[in-house]
Amino acid sequence: MSGPSPSTSTVDLTRFDALTFDCYGTLIDWEAGILAALRTALTGRSSTDAAGVTDEALLEAFGRHEAEIEAGPYLAYRTVLERTARAIGSDLGLAISDEAAAAFGGSVADWPAFPDSAGALADLAARFRLGVITNCDDDLFAASERRLGVTFDPVVTAQQTRRYKPNPRGFELAFERIGLPTTRILHVAQSLFHDHVPAKRLGLTTVWVDRRGGRPGSGATPPATARPDLVVPDMRTLADLAIAAIPAP
């Protein structure tokens, strides 16, 4: 993964009326959620069968298999996760039961929000329209939206577009629903692969929420190279920059 280091704002935040977000990895701590649910799926009992495999190795395998499955014919995200778990299990020589695969497929609803997400979103919602473009099923995202404590408008899911980012269709549908020029929309995301690469191709200004904080590798996303316009370590930093730049009405 390649991008600039976290820095102070070089983006005029007063130019934007709408913020679109990636959810998983940006607002929801999907790496924590993935690891907890995946280790359970690989053992069926939260035990030690995959204990010798590092977290980073599991995340890298997840990112690789998930992207390969999402690039094929459309499948519900639950099914994507089930097949991803089975593929990782096959890599490790571990059988995944139907019950364990299904539990992993529905685990998104239990993935935790980052501690700074809800408060930062509440502050940003006072000034911007907030939308989300997410590689997820409608009902699974609804559980995450409740965790985040805000209402997004629009909500664009892979279930609605029948395509997964980095396919641009989710962005295009969001543009249609927002009804603003893309120059008035700021996209905020963690994944360079899923979000920043397609967003920059579409001419969007982007903010990279670099949740991995300089750790090596790209975690649960395939490696990619992109040049976001602003880099922040978390959502709280972005909200503070917006508050500083834009006087309250």
Image: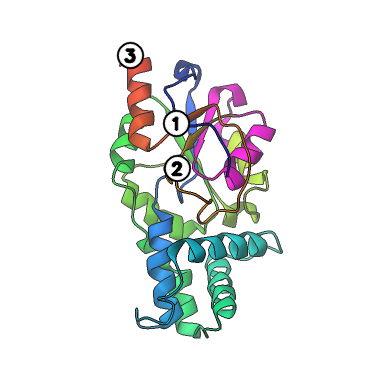
Residue 158, how many percent across, how many down?
58, 54
Task: Give the CA distance from mark 2 to mark 3.
Answer: 32 Å
Q: Secondary structure at mark 2?
A: loop
Per the image, the residue denoted by label 2 is 214
Is residue 77 positioned above or below 192 on the image?
Answer: below
Dot in front, 3 or 1: 1
Residue placed most toward the observer, 22 or 180: 22
Tags 1 and 2 touching, CB below 8 Å: no
Per the image, the residue denoted by label 1 is 6
Q: Secondary structure at mark 1?
A: loop
Is residue 160 positioned above or below 126 on the image?
Answer: below
- The reply to whether residue 26 is visible in this rendering is yes
Is residue 233 positioned above or below 77 on the image?
Answer: above
Residue 123, how many percent across, how many down?
31, 30
Judged left or right of residue 125, residue 230 is: right
* In the image, residue 199 lies in the stretch drawn in magenta: yes
Per the image, the residue denoted by label 3 is 247
Residue 195, how many percent across, how many down?
58, 42
Tell me where the magenta segment starts and ends, as one range: 177-204
Residue placed most toward the observer, 39 or 19: 39
Residue drawn at x 63%, y 59% as measured from the top left? 67
For badge 2, the amino acid type reads: Gly
Judged left or right of residue 85, residue 145 is: left
For badge 1, the amino acid type reads: Pro
Residue drawn at x 42%, y 22% as measured from the top left? 8
Task: Give the CA distance from mark 1 to mark 2.
Answer: 10 Å
Task: Give the CA distance from mark 3 to mark 1.
Answer: 24 Å
